[in-house]
């Protein structure tokens, strides 16, 4: 019995001595940097509209924390810089960042291409969040597929739709100052002058439609940080984006059939 107990004790001690060596299975800084530099789709539970996190660089601190060069925002909008970091804690690899409005995203790596965790909004509400790696090629494929779907989803306004509202139906493109080319699809207009619309810019993933009200020859699209107003003037939309920091103006033109 003493022999068995002694053998068990030696085995237990061996396990204890080996456990610290598990840290050797941690990924190197180089491995992490290679895996991270990419675009990532961010999906918050209960929301159809996705965000995009683009990581372009990573520098290591003395404690092993990686400080990330990253931009973040709605996939169908422009992304702007955020404070982000990656931390290895034991076997966990944690991706953390704070959004521009102040929401906190805290995730743990579940595979080389996936992080999962929580999205804590500024009002304190907490939702599950999933962050998935996506290549630039995949982004372009998604954009092209979405354009094809949207082009085929244009519904001709019915006779009960007021003419001044029906005139917004179609595909439009323009360029906001300091931003890339942007598209606006108005795929369906109801008799109540509420339209089904979607907007995105170059290299951003179009992913969901929203309701846009048309009133007094102006289509209004709500954004997280402001409001877009599109005034119809012939085959042009005179656009105005109003937000807390001021406003932008642009002119959108109607796309011809087959034109992108």
Image: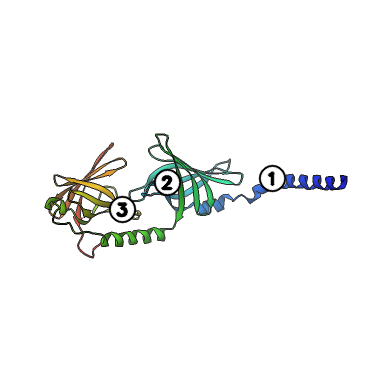
How far apart are labels 2 and 1 at the CA level? Answer: 37 Å
> Disc 2 marks which residue?
45
Towards the viewer: 183 or 62: 183
Mark 3 closeness class: few <14, some 14–19, many ≥20 residues within 10 Å: many
Q: Is residue 198 left or right of residue 104?
A: left
> Disc 3 marks which residue?
201
The x, y position of residue 90, in whole percent, is 61, 44
The x, y position of residue 174, in whole percent, is 23, 53
How far apart are labels 2 and 3 at the CA level? Answer: 24 Å
Residue 72 visible: yes
Tell me whether the residue at label 1 lies in contact with that at label 3, contact meaning CB atoms closer than 8 angstroms.
no
Quadrant in which the C terminus appears? bottom left
Tell me whether the residue at label 2 lies in contact with that at label 3, contact meaning CB atoms closer than 8 angstroms.
no
The x, y position of residue 25, in whole percent, is 63, 51
Badge 2 or badge 3: first in the primary sequence: 2
Disc number lying in front (2 or 1)? 2
Badge 1 or badge 3: first in the primary sequence: 1
Identify the mark at residue 20; answer none if there is no mark: 1
Q: Is residue 206 left or right of residue 115?
A: left
Mark 2 closeness class: few <14, some 14–19, many ≥20 residues within 10 Å: few
Q: Residue furthest top?
A: 123
Q: Secondary structure at mark 2?
A: loop
Badge 2 or badge 1: first in the primary sequence: 1
x 38%, y 38%: residue: 101
Q: Is residue 8 left or right of residue 55?
A: right
């Amino acid at each position: 019995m003493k022999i068995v107990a002694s053998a068990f004790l030696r085995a237990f001690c061996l396990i204890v001595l080996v456990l610290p060596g598990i840290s050797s299975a941690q990924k190197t800084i180089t491995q992490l940097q290679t895996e991270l530099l990419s675009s990532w789709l961010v999906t918050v539970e209960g929301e159809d509209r996705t965000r995009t996190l683009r990581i372009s660089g990573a520098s290591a601190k003395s404690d092993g924390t990686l400080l990330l060069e990253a931009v973040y925002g709605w996939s169908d909008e422009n992304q702007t810089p955020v404070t982000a970091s990656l931390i290895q804690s034991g076997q966990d690899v944690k991706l953390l960042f704070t959004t521009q409005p102040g929401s906190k995203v805290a995730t743990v790596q579940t595979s080389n291409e996936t992080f999962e965790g929580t999205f804590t909004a500024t009002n304190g509400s907490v939702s599950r969040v999933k962050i998935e790696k996506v290549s630039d090629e995949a982004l372009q494929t998604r954009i092209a597929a979405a354009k094809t779907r949207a082009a085929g989803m244009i519904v001709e306004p019915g006779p009960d739709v007021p003419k001044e509202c029906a005139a917004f139906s179609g595909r439009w493109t323009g360029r906001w100052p300091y931003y890339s080319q942007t598209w606006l699809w108005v795929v369906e207009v109801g008799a109540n002058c509420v339209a089904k619309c979607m907007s995105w810019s170059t290299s951003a993933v179009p992913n969901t439609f929203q309701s846009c009200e048309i009133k007094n020859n102006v289509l209004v699209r709500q954004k997280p940080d402001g409001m877009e107003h599109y005034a119809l003037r012939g085959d042009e939309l005179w656009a105005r984006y109003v937000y807390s920091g001021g406003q932008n103006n642009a002119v959108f033109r109607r796309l011809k059939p087959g034109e992108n």
